Amino acid sequence: MEWKNFDLLDSYKKLENITSVEVKKAMTGENGAKRVKEYQVPMGGGQLYNYAAEPVDETVLAVLQELADEAELTEKYEALYNGAVINTGENRMVLHQLTRGQLGKDVTADGENKREFYVSQQEKAAEFAKKVHAGEIVNEAGEKFTTAVQIGIGGSDLGPRALYLSLENWAKVNNTLKMEAKFISNVDPDDGSGVLASVDLAHAMFVLVSKSGTTLETLTNESFVKEALVKAGLNPAKHMVAVTSATSPLAGNPDYLDSFYMDDYIGGRYSSTSPVGGVILSLTFGPDVYARILNGAAEEDVLAKNKDIKQNPAMLDALIGVYGRNFLGYGTTAVLPYSQALIRFPAHLQQLDMESNGKSVNRFGESVSYKTGPVIFGEPGTNGQHSFYQLLHQGTDIIPLQFVGFKHNQMENDIVIQDSTSQQKLNANVAAQIMAFACGKEDENRNKYFAGGRPSSIIVGEQLTPEALGAILAHFENKVMFQGFVWNLNSFDQEGVQLGKVLAKKVLAKETDGALTAYSELLGIF
Amino acid sequence: MEWKNFDLLDSYKKLENITSVEVKKAMTGENGAKRVKEYQVPMGGGQLYNYAAEPVDETVLAVLQELADEAELTEKYEALYNGAVINTGENRMVLHQLTRGQLGKDVTADGENKREFYVSQQEKAAEFAKKVHAGEIVNEAGEKFTTAVQIGIGGSDLGPRALYLSLENWAKVNNTLKMEAKFISNVDPDDGSGVLASVDLAHAMFVLVSKSGTTLETLTNESFVKEALVKAGLNPAKHMVAVTSATSPLAGNPDYLDSFYMDDYIGGRYSSTSPVGGVILSLTFGPDVYARILNGAAEEDVLAKNKDIKQNPAMLDALIGVYGRNFLGYGTTAVLPYSQALIRFPAHLQQLDMESNGKSVNRFGESVSYKTGPVIFGEPGTNGQHSFYQLLHQGTDIIPLQFVGFKHNQMENDIVIQDSTSQQKLNANVAAQIMAFACGKEDENRNKYFAGGRPSSIIVGEQLTPEALGAILAHFENKVMFQGFVWNLNSFDQEGVQLGKVLAKKVLAKETDGALTAYSELLGIF
């Protein structure tokens, strides 16, 4: 297996010289209909990844397959899940897929079988949640806990929060919403104050999440919460659990009801299927629903082993993204879920993608001379249509689009207005938008003219269930991983976040000079 | 006054040939400190716009001043607020600034003085809110309303929602939170169901907002809500008011408790200071707080009249943005408020900016050959630091940054940990980030190397008060307006949203062919 820079590959040269596909032409007429029916790949959770409106045809796809083979994408994935040290910068294995399935060989580290370790932590969280739900673990007054509040930031916040919001309403109608969840992340004291003001403290269970046990924001918010508990005459040790690594200062601390462990082989942004997501989601939805999320993710992870790009949705999505980024000049990708439940999923993908592949050096620390990770942003449709879609349709840059849609909504209510349900209206808009972006519209009035040629893909499922959600989560994790392989990056470290931390400490220690002193004065810190 | 394409201006040529400023060099040492102290402009609400870390110096600023003069930016603004037909595509005046002050001559339209009309609507909303608060307008059981639920999408949702969230906690600690607000926007039926499930219907007042009275999503959600009210044994006509134009089908309809008016001279994304924002904000915070928001905006509008760019923060911000977009190749701007209360402000700015200036034709409908509006995205700090900042620091593209920060937080609670408050930690991070982006860090390990040279500005205030918020709102409205003037765009129409609507209707009427039929089948509509 070889780790080579992207621009040294033969397939890179081929992609440079390939004739590009005109999306508008390809999607017009019966050929377009044929593409919609044929250009799709089964995904986990019974979903499909449809790429009909992407700028690819059989010729481009053949070269993308060559790229997949030449860059040894599935071999690298296999090495990863079998325990190779893929995170070279931090000298660590990358094992988040093991939290949801045994994909290859047993992986041993820290003197234990890691799959067994992750299963044991999942089970521990399940047992704990069951005791809370059964009223075996209760507050000082012997009453049940009703709310779970996660204290964490970055990967300890965005993924779990996005997953919770994705299934909150689904859980309500399926009678499996055991507890409500809230989240405190920002060091801004108003974040903690605002959340605490909306919580019944006496019946709140706090889930403190920090792998290192040293994250400044999270420890500060922990103290903030503990102070509020004490003020309310409550005992913090009866209201808080820790999710951390076994070697952190938080581990096994008697100040917590219990501790749940992840390890250094799971990066924050890949940790939603570890206890970082598992504890809060088991508490709120019950362990069975959480297990269903893991099953959906595992299904997707298995698909990612396929060498054939037409049977590997994450790899195909990754390769089409790379083609757009490096050969068609697209710098930004919009994520557009047509499901209000996915409201914070784009924010999770922002971290997942931009923190993983927003890098300028390869895995050996050498500068690369090609573009890497794009900017990711998005909001649910149809809201986005009434907001930034103007630029997507008629702006001077082309922004590739990732749609997500479901045949059925999550809750039981719907209404027929003008002969269609709201769900039909919602989906009519997805279909319409894809075609409007792809084919545009001629008009002599240039202000009403749509050039088209704006590519998109769509993930389509029956309903946003736990399995579907898990599969979507893993799809994007695996997409980002494959893109990192193509770009020859280490997608699993984040050295770019360090400098800001160092300088912030200097400010707080008043060890500054020059403009940093001036800004500190401006902001009223000094 | 002349409307000319940007690239035909003499100052365009000058900017093409100007020596660019190295941010890293400029911000290093005592020169950096000097820039922080000098490169700032007073804003409304007692705030400052500081542009020390932008790629400008006296030479660049002089050419930007020439550009402002040559493009007649303040003259065009003056024409706008004096009632010229600036929205050429729709043949309309652009009067949102008049909702918060009389900036120039009286403007007459539809047989009335528009400033007086806007004031009368503000007063009407104030009187209505006072009656609701006083228990003079009550539900069927004679009880007070406790929650206000806005039904609207796009500009009828994003701006008012962002403003509400910005002041919700502030209002709590200042004892002026009269009612809680909720928002229903998406045609996804789960949005309405989810919100209604969290609302005490018997004590909820719905504010239906649609200028045209024909917005499909909003009318659908209105029916959805009315059905829920009827099912709960409540009379919809006792629970709903309309905000619309005087000529819409919703106006003066006896199905509503009352109607409040805006008009065609206020675009959706500029309507937060009209009754679109005014009714819900007067209900939730009280008319006095709403008036304070307007005062902050008005203060900023007055500053925007200054011909000297060093005394006109919105115009300067606009020009620096144009310089980065057209001459330094920056395609995206990140908005990074270090205040959790501003969590949805970036989403509002996304619409404001991308829908206004995401265009490829000038105000005469001719294609332009330069880049126009950038992609806008953002999340509050410090959350973003643990998410996408990796790419901002070390990615292959440079993304200019707009920070916002406040010396004091909104709520009373804070906590000292390791000798500093949370607010100090928050602001230490802003200061640190600006300098990390600007100056970077040398390191032999290229993985830990930061190139720097990543520009930013910051708006700094004492506290996020109603006045400060109003000023920030107007700052960005005016920035977008000035950029539109430079790019010779009509920033006040949105033809790019029409095609999708037309095609969605075709899908619902089953009048499709080709790929649109195939997508409709895929999504389960047919």
Image (cartoon, coloured by chain):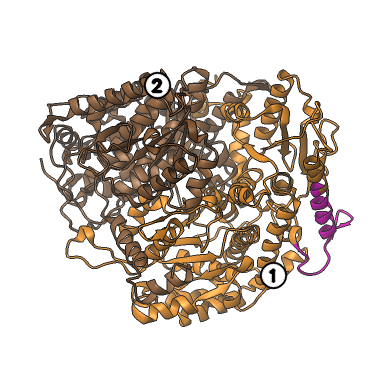
Chain colours: A brown, B orange
x, y percent for residue B160: 65, 47
Asked whether residue B105 is drawn in magenta, I would say yes
B513 sits left or right of B440 in the view: right
Residue A47 seen: no
Q: Nearer the viewer, residue A506 or A83?
A: A506
**Which amino acid type is marked by label 1?**
Val
Q: Secondary structure at mark 1?
A: helix
x, y percent for residue A156: 35, 41
Residue topped by disc 1: B302
Q: Nearer the viewer, residue A326 or B94?
A: B94
Whether discs 2 and 1 lie on one chain: the answer is no
Q: Nearer the viewer, residue A474 or B330?
A: A474
**CB contact under 8 Å: marks 2 and 1:** no
Residue topped by disc 2: A286
**Which amino acid type is marked by label 2?**
Gly
Residue at the image position 55 percent from the left and 55 percent from the top: B360
Asked whether residue A216 is drawn in magenta, I would say no
The outermost residue toward the right is B111
Residue at the image position 78 percent from the left and 31 percent from the top: B143
x, y percent for residue B459: 52, 65
In the rendered image, the vertical position of residue A476 relative to residue A366, given as above or below:
above
Structural crowding at the residue carrying mark 2, measured as other residues with C-alpha within 10 Å and reported as few (<14), some (14–19) or many (≥20): many
Quarter in which the C terminus of chain B is drawn: top right
Q: Which residues are magenta?
A: B101-126
Chain name for mark 1: B
